[in-house]
Image (cartoon, grey):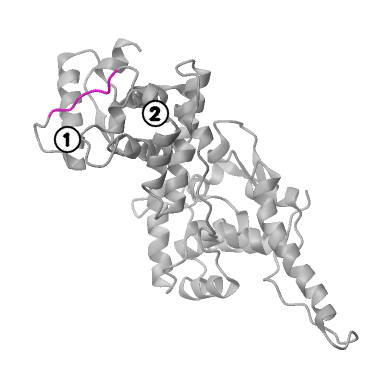
Amino acid sequence: MNIVEIEFPFLVSDTDRHGNLRLYVRRHGRKIRMREARGTPAFARAYANAVETLEVAQGRKPGQRHTIAPHGSLGWLATLYFKDGQFTRLNPVSQTRRRSVIEECLREPVEPGSKQIMRDCPLAHVNAEAILMLRDRRQEKPGAANNRLKYLSAMFGWAIEARRINRNPCRDVKPIGYATDGFHAWTPAEVAQFEARHAIGTKARLALALLLLLGVRRGDVVKLGRPHLRGDLIAFVPSKTSYRRKDLSVKPILPELKAIMDASTLGELTFLTTSYKRPFTAAGFGNWFRERCNEAGLPHCSAHGLRKAGATRAADNGATEHQLMALFDWTTPAQAAVYTRKANRARLAADGMKLLATDQTENVKSPTLSVPLKIAEQ
């Protein structure tokens, strides 16, 4: 560990669009910009004040002593992980999510009633039983429990490659099994209800069309703009996988989407902008779109649910797994197979229903699965 990691363990950095380095103090999922020159007494004072401010915001009393995780502890390993390129190359949303979950684990007591927290626990004592304890403390929310296991395992996997440790204690702990469909997938009726509330020409209708007819994530829809247009195509690098590959995702602009874009006010840099004419952040857009859903009487619907609706619609209309992968920028067939399995099951059930009938000559009408969606040739 170098001296910077010892003195400033909560310091993170990024670069703006002009290539300028920006420094922040990050704690508990929040951050404060550092504007003083690094290496000066003013910087050290500002750093200490920022850490104090973030600790107070988390619930620690002003003036309460803060200690840095001991060398060789779980917290020490997390500090190294958060500064490594394998972590910092993740997209910002993934970084925030992983850091938040891991830091939540670090604040857990090593056992009920103990004043010692997992941050200070020596790595030699972080075994499968300790990981199981951390997992099960969130067992009332299986998804959150499994995220603890998933992100800790990723950190230990990195640590093995970095030769910090020689074993991954998460390997002997299984995820909690549970049934869930995740985000609600919009139904055709819900899409029509939103469209009835938000007419063509409104920002809300434009957002709906971009999400549904391009199949993009909210982290990408806020970045799409005129620079990505290629005639009747739109081309961009998906942000979720940009740290692994820079392959362009090229999608046709369907006539329905083009008509809505032509009738809408588009931003100069990005199609969607805030009331201040600035690009949305992914989180800001999610909150804004949630309000538009509430206005349409759809509080249970979300931006991500539109992506699921599009995948369901395409699969129901016969899209193959590789077509779905191209449409929705998935990297493995397993993600697309979730939708093709459901669609195939529905078709097989419809075709097989006649076998249950007493009169085998009785015609059984296949159910209507969804509203048609044009699928680009791959």
Was residue 69 drawn as part of the magenta stretch in this picture? Answer: yes
Q: Position of residue 52 (x, y in %)?
A: 16, 32
Q: Position of residue 305 (x, y in %)?
A: 53, 60
Query: For this rendering, which residue is in front, 291 or 93?
Result: 93
Work out whether residue 262 can be spotted.
no
In which quarter of the view is residue 371 placed? bottom right
Tag 2 near tag 1, CB within 8 Å: no
Residue at 55% in and 70% down: 191
Q: For mark 2, give the secondary structure.
A: loop
Q: For mark 1, give the secondary structure.
A: helix
How far separated are the C-alphas under marks 2 and 1? 30 Å
Numbered label attached to residue 53: 1
The amino acid marked with disc number 2 is Val
Residue at 29% in and 22% down: 9
Q: Is residue 25 above or below residue 249?
A: above
Was residue 54 drawn as part of the magenta stretch in this picture? Answer: no
Q: Main secondary structure of the magenta part?
A: loop
Work out whether residue 287 can be spotted.
yes
Numbered label attached to residue 192: none
Density class for disc 2 (Cα within 10 Å; few <14, some 14-19, many ≥20) is some
Q: Of circles 2 and 1, which is in front?
A: 2
Q: Position of residue 318 (x, y in %)?
A: 77, 61
Please give the range of residues in magenta.
Answer: 65-70
Relative horizontal placement of residue 107, taking residue 372 as reference (left or right): left
Relative horizontal placement of residue 55, taking residue 321 as reference (left or right): left
Residue at 74% in and 48% down: 322
Query: For this rendering, which residue is in front, 108 or 225?
Result: 108
Query: For this rendering, which residue is in front, 174 or 157?
Result: 174
